[in-house]
Image (tube, coloured by chain):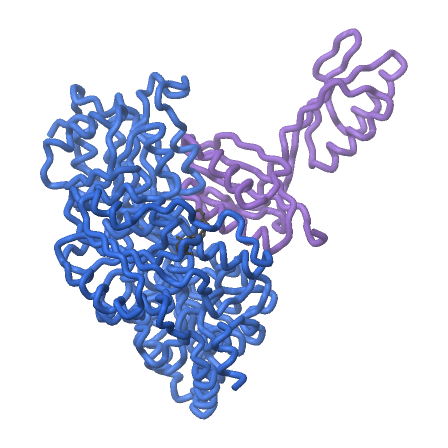
Amino acid sequence: MSDDRRYIISVLVENEFGSLSRIAGLFSARGYNIHCLNVAPTNDESISRMTIVTMCNENKINQLMKQLDKLVDVVNVKDLTDETHIEREMLLLKLKCNKGQREELKRLVDIFRARIIDVTDTTYTVELTGASEKIMAFVSSMGSINIIEMVRSGALGISRGKDSLENIK
Amino acid sequence: MKLSGSEIIIECLKREGVKYIFGYPGGAVLHIYDALFSSNEIKHVLVRHEQGATHAADGYARACGKPGVVLVTSGPGITNCVTGLATAHMDSIPMIVISGQVSRQYVGSDAFQEADATGITRPVTKHNFLIDSRESIPEVFKKAFKIATTGRPGPVLIDIPKDLTDPKIKIKFEYPKTVKLRSYKPPKKEVTTKIEEAAKILCSAKKPMIYTGGGVILGNAHKHLHSLVKKLNYPITNTLMGLGGYPATDKQFLGMLGMHGTYEANMAMHDCDVLLAVGARFDDRVTGDTEKFCPSAKIIHIDVDPSSISKIIKVDLSLIGETSSILKDLTKSVEKFTRKIDKKNIEKWWKKIEKWRQRKCLGYKKSKDIIKPQQVIESLYNITKGNAFVTSDVGQHQMWAAQYYKFDKPNRWINSGGLGTMGFGLPAAMGVKLAYPKSEVVCVTGEASILMCIQELATCLQYHLPIKIINLNNRYMGMVRQWQEFFYEGRYAMSYMEALPDFCKLSSSFGHIGIQIDKPDELESKMNEAMSNKNRLVFVDVITDQEENVYPMIKSGQAHNEMHLSPTNEETELA
Ligand SMILES: Cc1ncc(C[n+]2csc(CCOP(=O)(O)OP(=O)(O)O)c2C)c(N)n1
Ligand SMILES: [Mg+2]
C-alpha cells in the first residue's frame, strides 16, 4: 500500500519458552511483515528485549501494537518511530580484495569509521555500527570490491532521555 | 501434604471448583487418570472423540459461565482438540485443556504419540503452557484459570510431560492464593469523563441504534444493558452471539442484525446517526460492506479488549473495560442528560422503524404437503415456552433457530458463531445438560452437521443426558446449496447428502428414541410427544422443504440497506 512506511518498535517479553514464536506467529497470522528482528536478554534476566522493524500503514501499526500488548508474555511495547530515539545496527562484511582495491577499501573504512577486524591474504572482514542508512550506504559504496558474506544484526532502538521501557508500567 | 504430580493436578482442579472433566484417556495421561480414579469430587465424562470433549466443555462454559475443563492424551488426543480450541477461541469462551505429553527425556525425539501441542495450539488459544517441573504445576494452573476467565476470556492449554505425573515421586503441595502476572493486564476502569461524553452523544441522537454482541453475555452485563435501553427508549439489535443479551420479546428489540438479520434491524443500522456497540467486534457477517457501514453514524464502542477497537470500523469514542461496569456507569451518567433527548425525533425514528417492521421480513408461506423449517423452530419455541437452552450446529438450521426462537434470557443460545464449526451442537448440548440437568436442552441441527460428532450419542446414554435433537433434514448441506443457488447458477456441487442413514434406527441403535416427522399436520403432536419425554434422549428427524432459503440475506460486498427479502415477502410488499 502506498501509505506504508517503516516502523521501529521495541517489545519487552518474558524470557520464557515459546515467547519468540508467539510474537513471530502473531506477525505471520495477521499478515505483517518482519523486515528485521533482534532479540537478546536484558539486565533483568527474566526479560528479553526485541527490536522489530516492519513496513505498514498507521491503522495497521495501531492494531499491531494492541495485538502485541494483548499477548500474555508481552510485558511492554513501544513504537519508537516518532519518538526521539537512537538506532544502531552492526554489520560484519567479508570482502574479497585484490591488491589494487586495498587502498580504496581502507579509505572507505576511514570515511565510515568502520574497523577491519580480520585479514587474510585474499580477504578483509570489516565491522561497522551505525543507523541502517549508514550501513546500506557503506555496503553500496563497495563498488567493484567483491562481497563474500554479509551479516547484519538488525536495528536496535532505544529512546533518548530518561524514559525506560522497563519502568513505564 | 505431599502429593504426586497427578495428585497435584487433581487438587488444583478441586481448588478451582471444577465439577466436571470431559476427557479421553491414553498413555501420556494414565497417571493422571489413575489419580482421578481415587477422587470422587470431580466427575469425569468419557466422550467418544476428543473434539466432543472440547465442545462439551465449551457448551458447559457458555451455559453457566464457569470454565470447561478437558483432559486428553498426547499426540492424536491433543490434535483432535484443535477444532474445539479454535471454536472456543473465536467466541472467547473460558476453557482449560490439559494434555499429556511424552516424558521430558523424549520431548523433541519424534517419540510415539509426540506432538508439539503448544506449537500447534498457539494460534487457537489465549495462552498455553508446557510444564517443565513438578514444582511449577500449582502456579501454572492458577495462572491458566486466571487467564482463561478474566479480561476477554478464552481457552488455555496446559501440556504436561508424563514423567512429571509419576505417582512415585511426591512433593510438598501448596496452592497459591493469588498469582502475579506482570505481563497480563486486563483493562483498568474507564475514566468518568469519557463515560459522560458517551452519555452526551447518546442523548443528542436523533436516530440512535444500539448493537450488542457476545461481550454482553460473557460479561454478564444483560441487566445493566436492559436498564440503559429502557432508560433511553432506543431500539436495540443483537448479533448472532449476542442473542438473549436483551429480551427478544421486548418491543424495543428489532431482532438479529447482519447477513441474515431482520429488515428493520439492518435498515436502522444503515440509517442511524448514533451507534452504540457493546461487546461486539464488527464481524464481516455483521457489517456487510465496511465502506458502507452505518454511513452517517457517530460510533461509540464498549469492549473489554482494546484490540477490538477500530480494528475493522473506525469508531469515534471507545470505552474499554468490563461491559457490565461500563454499562452501569453509563446508565447513571445518561440520567443526567435524559432531558436533552429530543423526544419528538425519537418518536419519528420509531415510526420509521415500525414501517420497516411492518414488512414482516420473517414471514413465510406454510404448505399442506411439506414442513417448512421455520415452522419447526416456531413449534419448538411454543412448546418450550422460550425457556429451553438451544444449541445448534452450522448452516441454515442455525440461522432459522436464531431468527425464530426468541431468546429472552442470556446464555440460552449456544452456537459456534465465530468459527462456524459443524459438529458443535450435540457435544455442546451435553455440556449444557450437565450444567443444568433440570432444564430443557435442545440441539437444533442439520443432517450434515449432526454426523460430524454423532458418536457422542453414546456419551449421552452412558451419562443419562436426555437432551432433544431436532434435525432439520433437508437432504442438503442447505447453506452451501443456498450459496450455490445464488452465486453458482444452481450448480449444486457436492452439497446433496446422499447415502444418509436412517436417523431413527441410528438413534435406537445407540439406545435412544428416534421419531420421524414428515407431514405438516403431524408436526405439533409429534413435537409434543418428543419434548414431553423428559427421561430419554429423543432424536427428532424432521423432513423439511428441501430448497427453502434463509431470508433476509445481505450478499457479501453489499450494504445493510441492500438486503434480499424472501420471494413471498417481496410480493406482499409490491401488492
Ligand atoms: C466443519 C465444517 N466444515 C464445513 C463447513 C461449511 N459449511 C457451512 S454450512 C454447511 C452445510 C451444513 O449442512 P446441514 O448441517 O445439513 O445444515 P443446513 O444448512 O442444511 O441446515 C457446510 C458444509 C463448516 N461450517 N464446518
Ligand atoms: Mg441440511
* Horizontal side, residue B32 vs residue B396: left or right: left
Residue projecting furthest to the top: A121
B336 with respect to A166 (left or right): left
- Which quadrant of the figure shows ligand 2? bottom left
Looking at the image, is B107 positioned above or below residue B290? above
- Please state the horizontal and vertical placement of residue B445, each as a whole percent of the image: 34, 55
| Residue B217, quarter of picture | bottom left
Task: Give the letter of the blue chain.
Answer: B
Q: Is residue B142 left or right of residue A14?
A: left
Q: Is residue A18 above or below residue B108?
A: below
Q: Residue at x 30, y 44 (%)?
A: B454
Residue placed most toward the observer, B261 or B526: B526
Q: Position of residue B346 (x, y in %)?
A: 44, 87
Please tell me the colour of chain A: purple
- Looking at this view, name the residue that lies furthest to the right: A100
Residue B389 visible in the current orientation? yes
Q: Is residue A22 left or right of residue A99?
A: left
Residue B426: x and y in percent read 29, 50
Q: Residue at x 30, y 37 (%)?
A: B50
Task: From this view, report whether residue B152 is shown above or below residue B127.
Answer: below
Q: Nearer the viewer, residue A146 or B501?
A: B501
Q: Nearer the viewer, residue B336 or B535?
A: B535
